[in-house]
Amino acid sequence: MNPTTLAPLSAPRIVAHAAMTLVGLSEHYRAGGNAGIPSQWSRFGPFIGHITNEVPGVSYGVVYHVDANNDFDYLCGVEVSRVADVPSGCVELRVPATTYAVFVHTGHIATIQATFTAIWERGLAEAGLEATDAPVFERYDEKFDPRTGLGGLEIWVPVAA
């Protein structure tokens, strides 16, 4: 038995989310090779609170452009009400309006992969849901403490309505 598949998982809530525009740092990762994400967040941290038109209090980690090999792009970012003055090294990403299954991760950030595995291996199926092709994102609000890795976060998976 693989212990990463045993993460506790509550039933998701379903949310119809409006389109949003994010600004942040984006990196490309090979399938299974996402060890660089924590350092990507460390590089992005100083930008938080200093991006023009930033919507305060929430940050996002977005998995997008997933290819047939499961290689993907990952963006650490914040939502903006309007794009202006994108900082050097940052990019703009538009996330389309879609319906999401929202799962809660309550453990330390280091165990997030176990929650993702549980979502893909059983969470969606147990909820009778099917993922669709759109960005998947982590939503970090003011309860999350990046210094300790505690406080929880939400994982938003696009699903067929």
Image (cartoon, rainbow, N blue to C red):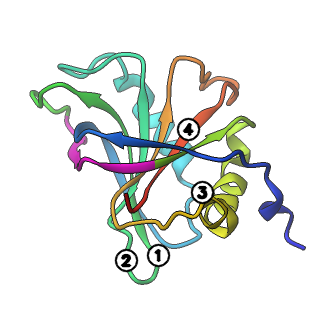
Part of the protein shown in magenta: 88-100
Which of the 4 quarters of the picture holds residue 123? Answer: bottom right
Give whichever of discs 4 and 2 has the lower sequence position.
2
Q: Report how far apart the C-alphas of labels 1 and 2 lie in the structure.
A: 5 Å
Q: Position of residue 110 (x, y in %)?
A: 71, 44
Could you tell me which secondary element the residue under label 3 belongs to? loop
Q: Report how far apart the C-alphas of labels 1 and 3 lie in the structure.
A: 15 Å
Residue furthest bottom in the image: 68
- Residues packed near mark 2 inside 10 Å, few (<14), some (14 to 19) or many (20 plus): few
**CB atoms at circles 4 and 3 under 8 Å apart?**
no
Give whichever of discs 1 and 3 has the lower sequence position.
3
Q: Which quadrant is home to the N terminus? A: bottom right
**CB atoms at circles 1 and 2 under 8 Å apart?**
yes
Give whichever of discs 1 and 4 has the lower sequence position.
1
Lateral position of residue 159 relative to residue 82, left or right = right
- Residues packed near mark 3 inside 10 Å, few (<14), some (14 to 19) or many (20 plus): few
Could you tell me which secondary element the residue under label 1 belongs to? loop
Q: Report how far apart the C-alphas of labels 4 and 3 lie in the structure.
A: 20 Å
Q: Position of residue 14 (x, y in %)?
A: 48, 44
Residue at mark 4: 154
**What's under tag 1, amino acid-wise?**
Asn
Residue at mark 2: 67
Q: Report how far apart the C-alphas of labels 3 and 2 lie in the structure.
A: 19 Å
Q: Give the camera-side residue of 29 and 140.
A: 140
